[in-house]
Image (cartoon, helix red, strand yellow):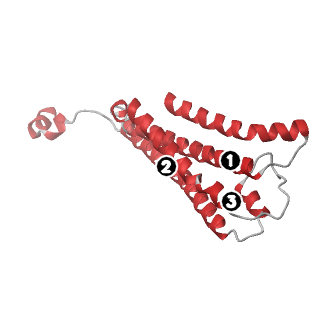
């Protein structure tokens, strides 16, 4: 569990640090403009760390499901090496998922001034500044949003399974555990009467 919390802390820290330079420039120097390359880089890191955070929350929900459903095998299933591998796989997935963003945005021509509506660059804001056709960016952005939403759906499904597991354990605790030896033996019933 501590590994997952540290992964979540790293993704939150990366998300904060990727938007910090732009926020400082806006609040200290009142400069709302940004160069396109800096905006593309910031967008890559913001979306990458956001997807990483969503993936870590998905892993954490799987961890809780496994701890409730299989408490005796939990430590043998989720070893430190396996947790590190899962974190690395989801980090690579998050970065590869948003890697095309800067390249697809770089090929567009922009005719509007690059002023930020937020304190950081968002894919939607950058697409609005473009004069050329951005249907590829629109559909790829939609695909990335669906992938991030699938993490949320899997988290919800995991918590449904966790609640079902809790109800199953509660039902097991309510059942009486009295031995029925006398009831199964016909001679024992005759002697008790």
* Residue drawn 87% across the image and 38% down it: 27
Is tag 3's residue or tag 2's residue first in the polypeptide sequence? 3
- Tell which of 73 and 57 is nearer to you: 57
Question: What residue is rendered at 78% in x and 63% in y?
Answer: 110
Q: How many marks?
A: 3
Q: What residue is disc 1 on?
A: 41
Element at label 2: helix
- Residue 42 x/y as whole percent: 70, 46
Judging by the rendered image, the residue that carries numbered circle 3 is 105
Asked whether the beta carbons under mark 3 and mark 2 sit within 8 Å of each other, the answer is no
Q: Are marks 1 and 2 in contact (CB under 8 Å)?
A: no
46 displayed left or right of 182: right
Q: Position of residue 140 (x, y in %)?
A: 60, 63
Residue 25 location, quadrant: top right
Image marks 1 and 3: residues in contact by CB distance under 8 Å: no
Most extreme residue toward the left is 187
Could you tell me which residue is drawn at 82 percent across and 65 percent down? 111
* Mark in front: 3 vs 2: 3
Q: What kind of element bears circle 3?
A: helix
Residue reaching furthest to the top: 2
Quickly name the residue at label 2: 160
- Please state which of residues 5 and 43 is positioned toward the viewer in this rendering: 43
């Amino acid at each position: 569990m501590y590994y997952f919390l540290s992964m979540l802390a790293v993704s939150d820290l990366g998300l904060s640090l990727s938007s910090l330079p732009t926020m400082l420039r806006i609040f200290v120097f009142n400069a709302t403009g940004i160069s396109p390359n800096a905006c593309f880089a910031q967008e890559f890191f913001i979306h990458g760390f956001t997807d990483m955070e969503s993936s870590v929350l998905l892993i954490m929900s799987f961890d809780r499901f496994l701890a409730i459903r299989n408490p005796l095998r939990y430590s043998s299933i989720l070893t430190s090496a396996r947790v590190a591998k899962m974190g690395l796989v989801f980090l690579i997935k998050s970065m590869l998922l948003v890697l095309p963003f800067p390249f697809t945005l770089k090929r567009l021509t922009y005719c509007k001034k690059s002023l930020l509506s937020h304190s950081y660059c968002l894919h939607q804001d950058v697409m609005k500044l473009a004069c050329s056709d951005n249907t590829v960016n629109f559909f790829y952005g939609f695909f990335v949003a669906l992938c991030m939403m699938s993490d949320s759906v899997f988290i919800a499904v995991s918590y449904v399974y966790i609640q079902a597991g809790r109800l199953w354990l509660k039902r097991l605790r309510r059942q009486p555990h009295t031995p029925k030896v006398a009831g199964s033996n016909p001679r024992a019933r005759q002697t008790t009467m």
